[in-house]
Amino acid sequence: MNNGNTASTTGARNTATTTDAPSTAHAPSTAHAPGTPGAPRKQRRRRRAAERRPRFAIAVTALFFALLYLPVGVVVLFSFNSQKSLTVFEDVSLRWYTAFLHDDVILDSLGMSLRVSLVAMAGSLVLGVALALGLVRSRSRLGSFAGLVMLVPLITPEIVTGVAAMLLFKGLGITLSTTTVMLAEITFSISYVTVILRSRIAALNPEVEEAAMDLGATRRQALRLVTLPALLPSILASAVLIFALVFDDFVLAYFTTGVDPQPLSVRIYSAIRFGVQPTINAVGTLMLAGSVGLIVLALAIPRLFGRRGGLDLLSGK
Amino acid sequence: MADTKARGPRLWTWLLLPGTLWMTGFLVASLLLVATLALGTTDPLGNPRFGFNPDNLTALADPAYRTVLLRSLGYALITCLICLAVAYPVAYAIALRGGRFKNLLIAAIVVPFFANYLVRMYGWSVVLSDDGPLLRFLRAIGVADDGTKILQTGAGVIAGLVYGFVVFMIIPLYAAMERMDTSLIEAGRDLYGGPLRTFLYVTVPATRQGAAAGCVLVFLPAMGDFVSAQLMGGPDQIMIGNLIQDKFFQGQNWPLGSALTMLLMAVLFLGMLGYLRRTRKDEAEAAR
């Protein structure tokens, strides 16, 4: 087990260096014109020329980034507009931010969204961390069932989960309220916590835990004193991530919320459906800033702990 | 690996229990409830009643619903294709030419995705609006004329779906390209394959699994979306998500809404089945 682990990590590192190497080594070669094949030197030149910049791909990428940031930029820019227009920028003003600070309905929504996110974060962390540990370590039949159930939210469109949650609450005679949003968001978030932590737990060396038990720790003590501290960066990172996801979630909240208060995204939805309200630009800008801050924090946490790779956000998992 | 069983697995099973119970209680039970209510009826006051009544399922055969379903399928498929067309060059450029900026560039794509979906879509609808920056630019360079519209058309809805979910295509494709052996591309070039031929015969096959995963990740939310059709489209562009939302909120016909939800699930299930069969085949070929 241990040998296998070491081999695979060095393997991964090797491929990383080999994939990195050509791009840096051939970077200066772009200036060379294609040569005729034949002499070794010319052959090398031709080879380098073949490595030339994929201009088309780079152009598409540039255009993609422009279009990716344009809508966000528009929201941020016009949140500082002194006029109501979304096409003509008049003057810099904080008018819409002031309007936001005096809008009790939106402030209530903000408070509710924060509460829901905190509760959903705590609840899904407790359930999700336990579930992830069980999924990796247990070989019981319950484990394979849990593995399947956990996948359901990930392969079901949110509208289906939303409709289902709403029907469940109504069917049980529960009035939709802040609590129902919290319950639905916890359910939805458990899978994310589990997916993020599962690969981390699988990457842990079980022999460290065994060593702790050889030194007299019970399994539970080993879990509490060895495994959980080792997982702490990933747990914190996923906590931040879940907070951001729940805070920004719209569909599930839309189907499970009561009338008053409503979560911030539901409030934004009604506002933009019934015509343009520049206050939404200000709220949107603040939310953007908040999410960006949280994501950067989630990505930075593992580094603060001085460990490599806490969140697998960037490796496609 | 083999010794895991011997090391008293009881604690691990106990840890599984709360999460599994919670998920079963909320998720599995609620999905079963949707399936049951799809067979129910409404009383004259519009309240849902359970029962065994195939009316809602036969109602789904109505041509109006079929049109909406086919439109949703079409929009979602076109969205997948456009996402592929955008994500391949972007992932390729970043994975192979990103150098030390790779992670930064990928983070720059992921971060705006975490911004509120509604705020992003709202900003996008402003960009695409009749006197928004995009159409003004296109008119200035003579590509579009005064009557050209993006909002209130199918193209607008698809643009919304692409903007909403393209990141789900880029990430798996990028991961696949990172794993790809780049010497294959060099080999293709050495064999005098042009950039396009090398891309089609070397890069695409080597990253096929990433592309397939991306298609699933884009197709699922695109099929269920109702925000894009609402903000970017008009009454002739509604998708199945809008129908479901309407039956639960404005229309107050929950059994019919449940039946539509089941229809959506069935379509997605068939899609997933196709994807799983495809990947199994790929794995079997790879094992050979």
Image: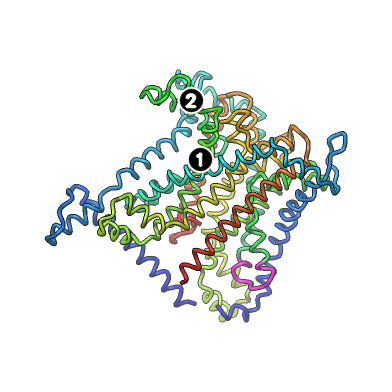
- Colour style of the rendered protein structure: rainbow
Q: Residue at x 45, y 75 (%)?
A: A4
- On screen, A229 above or below A244? below
Q: What distance separates the C-alpha of mark 1 from that of mark 2?
A: 28 Å
- On screen, B10 above or below B140? below
Q: Is residue B45 left or right of residue B144?
A: right
Question: Which numbered marker is on residue B263?
Answer: none
Residue B66 image point, x, y percent: 67, 39
Question: Which numbered marker is on residue B162?
Answer: 1
Question: Which numbered marker is on residue A80?
Answer: 2
The local secondary structure at tag 2 comes to loop
The local secondary structure at tag 1 comes to helix
Q: Residues within 10 Å of mark 2 (few under 14, many from 20)?
A: many
Residue B184: image quadrant is: bottom left
Residue A282 image point, x, y percent: 54, 29
- The reply to whether residue B56 is visible in this rendering is yes
- Quarter of the image with the N terminus of chain B is bottom right
Q: Residue at x 65, y 39 (%)?
A: B240
Q: Residues within 10 Å of mark 1 (few under 14, many from 20)?
A: many
Q: Which residues are magenta?
A: A133-144
Task: Between residue B66 and residue B253, name the one nearer to us.
Answer: B66
> What type of secondary structure mainly makes up the magenta span?
helix
Q: Chain of mark 2?
A: A
- Say which amino acid is labelled 1: Val
- The reply to whether residue A189 is visible in this rendering is no
Q: Are marks 1 and 2 on the same chain?
A: no
- Say which amino acid is labelled 2: Phe
Closer to the eye: label 1 or 2? 1
Q: Is residue A311 left or right of residue A191?
A: left
Residue B84 image point, x, y percent: 46, 47
Q: Chain of mark 1?
A: B
Task: Between residue B220 and residue A29, name the one nearer to us.
Answer: B220
